[in-house]
Image: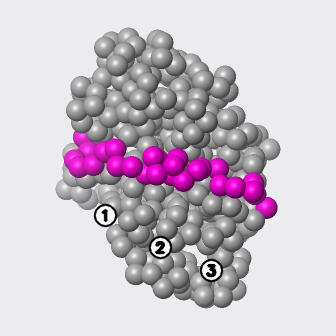
Amino acid sequence: MTGSASVEIGGTVEPGFEAVREAFAANFAEHGEVGAAVAVYRDGHKVVDLWGGVKEQGGTTPYGEDALQLVFSSTKGATAACANLLAQRGLLDLDAPVAEYWPEFAAAGKGAIPVRWLLCHKAGLPYVDHPLSLREVLAWDPVVDALAHQAPVWEPGTKHGYHAVTFGWLVGEVVRRITGKSLGTFFAEEIAGPLGLEFWIGLPDEQQDRVAPLVTWSQPKDPDMAALVAQFMGPDTMLGKALGGVNGIFLSEDDVWNRPEVRAAEIPAANGVTNARSLARMYAGLVGTVEGGPGEPLFTEDTIKRATELQTSGADEVLMLETTFGLGFFLSSPVARYGAPTSFGHTGAGGSMGFADPAHGLAFGYVMNRMMQGLMGDPRTAGLVRATYESIGVEPTYV
């Protein structure tokens, strides 16, 4: 099937979901899409699986069925799923001090911080203030050791602020201390494997050639706009520090997120590599049974209820927006535009998005190589989410 005259769109849609295909095609025609994919599950059955465009801007290699994509903070949904699964199994007490599992973390007055605050961005550790090289950051131990010894930026529990990159190291180290396995290994064995996902946190060498390079945004040329961007996310701002992770390293290193060694490392807040069908299938498998998957959902109803209970809302110290979190997941809101109040999931910088809506039996995944300037979705996802809900006869909210 074709979208516009110049963009080939491949894949399938079930009857009744043709509007999603139309919205996907419109993204190429109206919103400058380069290469992307979208997938939707309904009651465990895949009803949309589309891909289109090209792998590299200005190139001719199709963004085909086998393309993989780095999805930035959509990775946090996978990391949150690991922590909630451990809690479901009785191996992780969300209200226990982090230091109970990770004793070194008690340094600098952090001994009373509960695990729950790591998951809902209240720990006061939105960036690493110890100087580290990229090689040290990718090695894991140096960066988690730095976080263990660092003092919080604000009094833990009194505020919340998006831990853009540190979230993954903090939660991941707790998972490692409990299981003896890295976050990427635990995810591969307990979630990706059982569900049959092509989703990695720590990409194997043999999968690197499948990845579509990110088309990142450029700094605005207009001086006034450049000054505004600097005011919002410059290197001395809380957001700039959080996005940079460790002394701005993820903003200052040239084209860092397209480097194979960065994709191969484990950065469980930001460097997951997957495709739309696996992102949607993960959420479908958390809240329900899926074709060809385990015979029961990975999450019990009690786990879903606990994971989606409101933990954090209001002004975010980092994003300077009002954000709403459950246990590691964004809850549907005007910022996290997941189509219904019952939805939960995670969005990634530049546009990627995955979420589940248990009330309507929906799971959604979208990935792309062209980043747009927005942390919480953009017109491309808004159109796709709207079309998804309209396809089941539900008026969407927050889109």
Residues at discs 2 and 1 in contact (Cβ within 8 Å): no
Q: Which residues are magenta?
A: 292-321
Q: Which residue is the site of mark 1? A: 334
Tag 2: residue type?
Answer: Val
Colour scheme shown: one colour
Disc 3 from disc 2: Cα separation: 21 Å
Q: Is residue 180 above or below residue 261?
A: above
Q: Is residue 298 above or below residue 90?
A: below
Q: Residue at x 61, y 72 (%)?
A: 42
Tag 3: residue type?
Answer: Val
Disc 2 from disc 1: Cα separation: 13 Å
Q: Residue at x 63, y 70 (%)?
A: 43
Tell which circle, 3 or 2, labels the residue nearer the N-terminal end: 3
Q: Is residue 108 above or below residue 50?
A: above
Residue 310: image location, x then y, percent: 34, 49
Q: Is residue 41 above or below residue 15?
A: above
Q: Quadrant of the N terminus?
A: bottom right
Q: Residue at x 67, y 83 (%)?
A: 14
Q: Secondary structure at mark 3?
A: loop
Tell which circle, 3 or 1, labels the residue nearer the N-terminal end: 3
Residue 305 among magenta residues: yes
Q: Left of 118 or right of it: where is 54?
A: right
Q: Quadrant of the C terminus?
A: bottom left
Label ID, residue 7: 3
Residue 327 position by quadrant: top left
Residue 108: image location, x then y, percent: 33, 12
Q: Residue at x 36, y 23 (%)?
A: 113
Q: Is residue 211 in view from this perspective?
A: no
Q: Secondary structure at mark 2?
A: helix
- Given residues 65 and 391, the one toward you in this image is 391
